[in-house]
Structures are given as C-alpha cells and as structure tokens.
Image (cartoon, rainbow, N blue to C red):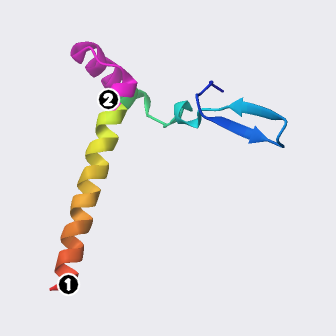
Amino acid sequence: MTLSSNPVNISNKMKIFIDMGLKVKHLTIRLSQEQFKKLADTLVIEQRTKSSLMREILCEYIDGKESRNKKRNQKAII
C-alpha cells in the first residue's frame, strides 16, 4: 500500500491515504522447454525484458481484437 494525497475517511476518527493505482499485476504462462529457449535467446539478442515483450504483445493483440470487433460490427450493420 502506498500513500496518496487523497484521504479516505474511516468512521470520522481517522483518515488514511491509499493509492490503488500502483498495484502490481503478475502474469504466469506455461512454455515448453523449446519455447522458453527461443524466447530467452530472442530477448538476449534484442536486449529486451520479458515484461516489455509481453506488454507489447498484449497491446498488439488487444488493438487487433478491437479492430476485428469494429469490422464485425460494421458488417452486421450493413
């Protein structure tokens, strides 16, 4: 828990400061040994972290999904 400048009033006696925006999120995935080896080699070559790669992949997937949904909705309207 981190402190924030916005107090939360608890039973009119005590105010606490909570910032829920900084919660850490974790993602666990299962990879085969071959997939992990390829991933590790690629990360070393590209000098990237697993986290930065996963964030980029998720953003591309989500953006692509939104784009596909828009196209699907446009076809349904026509």
| Disc 1 residue type (three-letter) | Ile
| Number of the front mark, 2 or 1 | 1
Residue most toward the front? 12
| Disc 2 residue type (three-letter) | Leu
Residue most toward the bottom? 78
Pick whichever, 65 or 1, lies toward us: 1
In the rendered view of the protein, which quadrant contains the N terminus? Answer: top right
**Is tag 2's residue or tag 1's residue first in the polypeptide sequence?**
2
Q: Image quarter for residue 57? A: top left
Is 66 in the magenta?
no
Residue 15, compared with residue 58, is above or below; it is above
Q: Which mark is residue 77?
A: 1
Region of the chain picked out in magenta, as a range: 37-53
Q: Which residue is label 2 attached to?
A: 53
Q: Image quarter for residue 51? A: top left
Pick whichever, 4 or 69, lies toward us: 4
The residue lying at 21 percent from left, 60 percent from top is 67
The residue lying at 48 percent from left, 37 percent from top is 29
For label 1, the crowd category at 10 Å Cα-Cα, with few meaning under 14, some 14 to 19 and many 20 or more, is few
Q: Which mark is residue 1?
A: none
Residue 57, compared with residue 63, is above or below; it is above
Q: Position of residue 72 (x, y in %)?
A: 22, 73
Q: Position of residue 20 (x, y in %)?
A: 59, 36
In the rendered view of the protein, which quadrant contains the C terminus? Answer: bottom left
Question: Would you say 20 lies left or right of 68 here?
Answer: right
Q: Position of residue 15 (x, y in %)?
A: 75, 33
Residue 77, compared with residue 34, is above or below; it is below
